[in-house]
Image: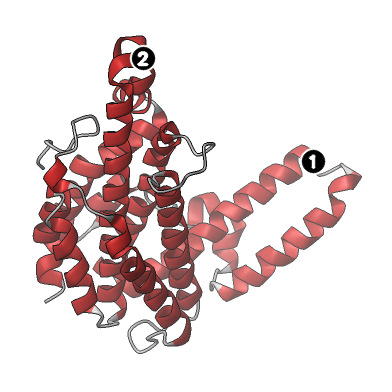
């Protein structure tokens, strides 16, 4: 990974992309996949009755997160309350889209079983949460209606997700826990997918996680522009950080929808390739990620 585009380097003038050129195409791209998933879900590829809603939700979350990051990184707004330093808060949001990419790759390795596991692990977490609430507030009359509704929800989703009585009797022991990206990598069977996950972990996930957890490197990433020693460089640091966040978000949204296109065989590859190659001319990280996986995936 070329680190010349790190968060706090200057922005080369020749690498300045007018976002308004590609913004309509990205909006159209996101709407295409959301509409396609909603209206033409390929049950011939995956027959799990819960898969359509799950993939549709993933697509909407990716879209919403992307739009939030771009909103925070907007350079055109004349609103004086939208301060440039707010763009730094978008760095941890990049991890949301990245985690979705990990999940799509993890699904690809064993699609039907992984989708089933995803739903069962979700029921597991809901049941554990319910039991914890009962333990703490079970005797509180104000919680009675909430407990009744939650029990009904658990019973409905238990049937919907095909959870057995044995699994439900001890969810912590008998139902799977959905893995973190690091654990996904260990369970991937395909050597190529395992290698790609390692790449994502090394060059993307590590930085975004540090920003989320505020370990020393993450604290530096999130807070360097505010240090007294950097006060004279503050504006430049913030501009570069904002630019990087927008480029990262755009690159990751391409990656997410490329994975979705591959999983569900929506065959919108030409539009994806156009956007990948366009942005690759302006940002080395986009180009490297495209050549690492998506150039061949979109053939």
Q: Which residue is mark 2?
A: 227
Q: Quadrant of residue 222?
A: top left
Any part of residue 111 in sight: yes
Q: From this view, report whether residue 51 is shown above or below residue 150.
A: below
- Name the residue: 21% across, 48% down: 200
**Residue 119 in the figure: left or right of residue 264:** right
- Label 2 or label 1, whichever lies nearer to me, is 2
Q: Which residue is mark 1?
A: 137
Instruction: Find residue 80 and report its horizontal and vertical position in percent.
Output: 52, 37
Q: Quadrant of residue 101?
A: bottom left
Q: Does residue 106 appear to the left or right of 273 in the view shown? A: right
* Quarter of the figure with residue 90: top left
**Residue at point 37%, 23% (across, down):** 223
Estimate the spatial distance between the alpha carbons at disc 2 and disc 1, rounded to whole Å: 45 Å
Q: Quadrant of the N terminus?
A: top left
Judge whether 163 appears above or below 267 on screen.
above
Residue 236 in the image: state x and y as whole percent. 27, 28
| Nearest to the observer: residue 277 or residue 256 | 277
Q: Are marks 2 and 1 in contact (CB under 8 Å)?
A: no
Q: Residue at x 22, y 53 (%)?
A: 17
Label 2 residue SS: loop
Q: Residue furthest top?
A: 229
Q: Residue at x 36, y 10 (%)?
A: 228
């Amino acid at each position: 990974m070329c680190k010349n585009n790190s968060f706090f380097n200057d922005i080369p003038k020749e690498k300045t992309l007018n976002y308004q050129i590609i913004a309509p195409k990205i909006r159209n791209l996101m709407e295409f996949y959301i509409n396609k998933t909603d209206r033409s879900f390929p049950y011939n590829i995956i027959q799990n009755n819960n898969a359509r809603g799950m993939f549709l939700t993933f697509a909407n979350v990716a879209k919403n997160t992307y739009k939030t990051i771009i909103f925070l990184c907007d350079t055109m707004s004349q609103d004086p309350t939208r301060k440039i330093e707010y763009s730094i808060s978008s760095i941890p949001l990049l991890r949301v889209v990245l985690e979705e990419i990990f999940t799509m790759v993890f699904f690809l390795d064993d699609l039907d079983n992984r989708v089933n596991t995803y739903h069962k692990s979700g029921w597991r977490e809901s049941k554990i949460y319910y039991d914890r609430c009962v333990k703490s507030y079970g005797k509180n009359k104000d919680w009675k209606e909430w407990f009744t509704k939650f029990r009904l929800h658990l019973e409905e989703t238990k049937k919907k997700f095909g959870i057995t009585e044995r699994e439900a009797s001890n969810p912590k022991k008998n139902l799977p826990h959905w893995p973190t990206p690091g654990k996904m990598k260990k369970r991937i069977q395909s050597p190529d997918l395992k290698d790609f996950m390692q790449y994502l972990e090394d060059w993307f996930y590590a930085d975004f996680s540090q920003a989320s957890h505020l370990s020393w490197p993450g604290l530096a990433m999130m807070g360097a522009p505010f240090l007294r020693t950097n006060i004279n460089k503050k504006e430049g640091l913030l501009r570069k950080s904002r630019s990087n966040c927008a480029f990262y978000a755009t690159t990751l949204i391409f990656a997410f929808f490329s994975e979705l296109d591959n999983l569900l065989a929506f065959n919108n590859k030409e539009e994806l390739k156009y956007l990948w190659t366009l942005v690759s001319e302006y940002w080395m990280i986009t180009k490297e990620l495209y050549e690492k996986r998506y150039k061949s995936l979109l053939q």
